[in-house]
Image (spheres, rainbow, N blue to C red):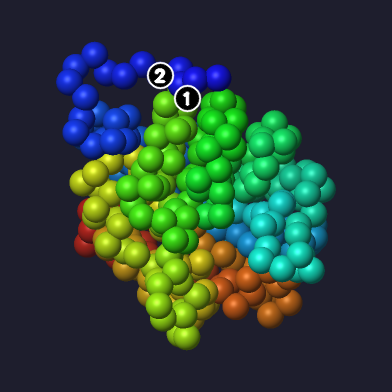
Amino acid sequence: MGPTVDAPSCALPSRPYRLADRAVSPSGTTVTVGDVTFGGSHVVVMAGPCAVESRDQLLQTARAVRAAGARVLRGGAFKPRTSPYDFQGLGRDALELLAEARAETGLLIVTEVMDSLDVELVARYADILQIGSRNMSAYRLLERAAGTGKPILLKRGFQSTIREWLLSAEYILAHGNSRVLLCERGIRTFDAEFTRNTLDLNAVPVLKQETHLPVIVDPSHGTGRADLVPTMARAAVAAGADGLLIEVHCDPASALCDGKQSISTEAFGSLMGELRRLGPFLGRAVA
């Protein structure tokens, strides 16, 4: 099936990502999901565990991040892991637990879809579909996800340029889904001794010039270190990010996935307080 969005009748923008080009919407685009708007006057915080591990773990974390002011709950049901022996997620059971957490807390749900075959299932539960770093260039998956009409959180590939990332977004836009959120989550560079990735905060102002789409920053994957997450979260807001995606766990030391980069619920509460105090200086509230 080919693209369902016609090219603009006026002269096309000079950039190859025709629909993502800033010239299409010079004032920027907002993406509204329920009562949450990305790209508006508020910086939206999405928080939760890397993976859904159990009912108690998820609900305890969800209650805490909601109380601290997060608007969206993140949690992986299907986990792409480098080793086949690592925890791969609870699958459908995790999706049902996420739905339970949403019903109790009112938080929206963002979770990753890894395979075209799972798009329909994940879309039945999730409010926002995440396309992970490893799948940024899985074009058939992008098209299938676009067809759901759900908002798509598109993470930057860890070895991808900004141009390649925007062209991946173009696949979603060209298939009739304008609800795209770009997520900078760090790229692989020559120095992995101190941080897992290099969080490319240059990308935030660059994207603000190049595209009209909202920009999210993930300081958890971007650093791989819980102690660096608060600093880089504050820096991301100062750089102009429209939202944050933060890994939070009720007991990071026992996490089955990415515990080293997950902050505790207590640390998340403190961070939210810092971000709220920072917001007025930048002219944007944090919620």
- Asked if one can make out residue 269 in the rendered structure from this viewpoint, the answer is no
The crowd level at tag 1 (other Cα within 10 Å; few <14, some 14-19, many 20+) is many
| Secondary-structure class at tag 1 | loop
Badge 2 vs badge 1, beta-carbon distance below 8 Å: yes
Residue 213 seen by the camera = yes
Type of amino acid under label 2: Val
Who is closer to the viewer here, 55 or 270?
Answer: 55
Percent position of residue 229, x then y? 46, 73
Residue at the location (21% across, 46% down)?
A: 209
Identify the residue at image location x=42%, y=65%. Answer: 187
Q: Nearer the viewer, residue 141 or 55?
A: 141
Relative image position of residue 143 (x, y in whole percent): 54, 31
Q: Earlier in the sequence, mark 2 or mark 1?
A: 2
Which residue was labeled with disc 2? 5
Residue 130 image position (x, y, % from top left): 56, 46
- Three-letter code, disc 1: His
Please, what secondary structure does the residue beneath circle 2 have?
A: loop
